[in-house]
Image (tube, rainbow, N blue to C red):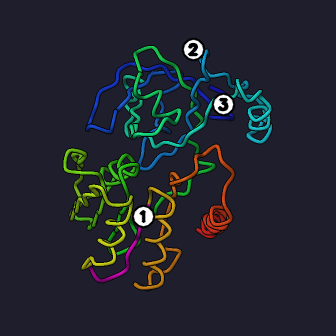
Amino acid sequence: MSERMPVRYLRVVAARPLAPHMVRVTFTGDDLTGPSLGGPDRQVKLYFPRQGQEVPRLPRPDGDLTSWYRSYTALPDDERPWMRGFTLRGHDPERGTVDIDFVVHGDSGPATRWARRVRPGAVLGMFGPSAEFASPFDTTTPDWLLLAGDETALPAVGSLLESLPEGRRAVVLVEVRDAAEELPLSTRADLDLRWIHRGDAAHGERLVAAVRAADLPSGRMGAWLAGEAGMVRSLRRHLVDERGVPKRDIDFAGYWRRSLTQDDAPTAEDMAEAREKLESARGR
């Protein structure tokens, strides 16, 4: 790995199902023994090989991020790896491994296709995590925490809960399809965990309704919202407009979009929210 840029190749050690639509993949690779990979909500970019590639083609991790990313985007379309965002679910510095959980859903996206047929020895590229681009969620200043999201938020929710000290109050609402998709979540915190079963309802509809109807604690809330972008947008508007939560106390991430992929251009709302997140991070 470059000393200046956190670019690595990862090799699959093992994979196991956690739920009908969730797979945990354990990777090894260069420079996975340091402490920089640990901690809650550590975001990375994974690079998936194109058809016919055993290893995704990536530029050498030389120079700065701008020049590296320019070299990446200059690769021919049929050779440039697909890029998707993920959260590190676990890190074992002694073994030099990381765990990443994949939601395996019904579409034919590159991450789902890869996770469905993953085998030991398969190789991905990874950028991050990087403190330079991180904006950690403040879990200490608010009186209590609200974590809300869909199944794609579970890896981050799990890592956040594991980081909380004993007695920290956290209310967690997670929408999944049904009870079979629920995962055990460990924490020392004072946890109020509420699973929302979507069934055949529209994605995010029942979670938004549940948060709107929720009897929440008094005091200053620190909110963390993640999952489908439209759902996150609705939750954020509710907290700001109807519950009076200051925008600075809400951390949010639209991991995916209902009708678009990460390969598609961002919408005007995506760009506005990205600018707002950047401004908020600069102000912290």
**Residue of label 3:** 3
Alpha carbon of mark 3 to alpha carbon of mark 1: how far? 31 Å
Left or right? Give the position of 111 relative to 63: left
Mark 3 or mark 2: which comes first in sequence?
3
Q: Which label sits in the foreground, 3 or 1?
A: 1
In contact (CB < 8 Å): disc 2 and disc 1 = no
In the rendered structure, which segment of residues is drawn in magenta? Answer: 217-225
> Residue 176, percent across and down?
30, 53
Q: Amino acid at mark 2?
A: Glu
Q: Answer with left or right where residue 18 lies relative to residue 67.
A: left
Q: Is residue 110 left or right of residue 151?
A: right
- Callout 1 amino acid: Trp
Residue 71 lies within the magenta run:
no
Residue under numbered circle 2: 54
* x then y, percent, for residue 156: 40, 50
Instruction: Tell me which corner region of the image, top left, top right, bottom left or bottom right, holds residue 170.
Output: bottom left
Q: Nearest the camera: 24 or 264?
A: 264
Task: Give the residue at x 51% y 60%.
Answer: 229
Marks 3 and 2: CB-CB under 8 Å?
A: no
Quadrant in the picture for residue 76 = top right
Dot 1 corresponds to which residue? 224
For the residues marked 2 and 1, what is the alpha-carbon distance in whole angstroms?
Answer: 37 Å
Q: Residue at x 37, y 80 (%)?
A: 220
Q: Mark 2 or mark 1: name the one nearer the start of the chain.
A: 2
Q: How dense is the environment of label 3, judged by Cα within 10 Å: few (below 14), some, or many (20 and up)?
A: few
At horizontal 53% and vertical 74% (from top left) the residue drawn is 248
Pointer 3 with pointer 1, Cβ within 8 A: no
Report, in whole angstroms, how far the alpha carbon at label 3 lies from the one at label 2: 26 Å
Q: Quadrant of the N terminus?
A: top right
Residue 118 image position (x, y, % from top left): 41, 22
